[in-house]
Image (cartoon, helix red, strand yellow):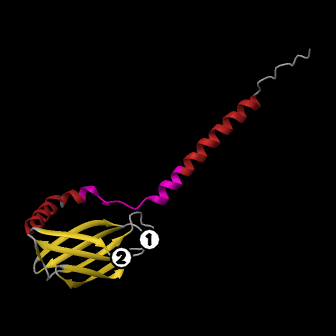
Amino acid sequence: MITSKPRAFTGWHMTTILVSFFAVVMAVNFTMARMAISSFGGTVVDNSYVASQNYNMWLKAADRQNRLGWHVVARLDAERHVRILVDSKGAALDDIQAIGDALHPLGREEDHALTFVSVGNGELRSREALPQGRWNLQLSLRRNTDIFHMREQVQ
C-alpha cells in the first residue's frame, strides 16, 4: 500500500487564493461600473435646491392645466407618426397648435423634434415618423392663451 504524504500549505498557496479572490472582485466591480455608466440616461434635475424653489409655481401651472378640462391622448399610428387627440368635455378641440420632442428613454438614440398638423376632429399628426423602439414624448399644446404640457411614453 502506497501512502501519500500530505502536501504542505505554503505562502504561495495563500497568495494564489488572495490574488484570485481580489481579481474576481475587481472584474465584477469594473463590469458593473461599466454597465451602470453606459446605461445612465441623465438626471431629472441638475440641482434639487433650485428645482425646489420653483415647486409652488409648478403646482399652480398644473392646477391651471387641470382646470382646462382637456383630455389628451397621444399614440403612434401604423406609419409611426405621433397622433394626438384633444377634447374638452367630450367635444373635439380643433384650433390646437402643438410642438414636442421624442426622447429615447436611455439616451442611446438621438432626440427628435416634432411638429404637428391638424387632421381635423380634434386630432393632430406629427410630420415626422419615429424610428422603431420606445420613446418618451414631451408635448406642448396651445389654444389661444391656454397651454397644456404632457409627457407620454409610446412604443
Residue found at the far right of this picture: 1
Q: Which residue is mark 1?
A: 109
Q: How many marks?
A: 2
Quadrant assignment, res 150: bottom left
Question: Which disc, if any, is residue 78?
Answer: 2
Name the residue: 21% across, 79% down: 123
Q: Is residue 74 left or right of residue 10?
A: left
Along the line of sight, the residue nearer the viewer: 37 or 78? 78
Name the residue: 7% across, 66% down: 67
Q: CA distance from mark 2 to mark 1?
A: 21 Å
Three-letter code for the amino acid on which mark 1 is drawn? Glu
Residue found at the far top of this picture: 1
Residue 39: where, in percent of width, then height?
A: 46, 59
Q: Is residue 92 left or right of residue 118?
A: left
Three-letter code for the amino acid on which mark 2 is drawn? Ala
Quadrant assignment, res 3: top right
Mark closer to the observer (2, 1): 2
Residue 1: where, in percent of width, then height?
A: 92, 14
Along the line of sight, the residue nearer the viewer: 142 or 128? 128
Q: Quadrant of the C terminus?
A: bottom left
Residue 50: where, in percent of width, then height?
A: 24, 59
> For the residue carrying disc 1, how many other residues have a C-alpha within 10 Å: few (<14), some (14-19), or many (20+)?
few
Under tag 2, what secondary structure?
A: loop
Along the line of sight, the residue nearer the viewer: 62 or 127? 127
Under tag 1, what secondary structure?
A: loop
Quadrant assignment, res 48: bottom left
- In this view, 18 is above or below 112: above
Residue 102: where, in percent of width, then height?
A: 34, 72
Along the line of sight, the residue nearer the viewer: 39 or 20? 39
Q: Which residues are magenta?
A: 32-50
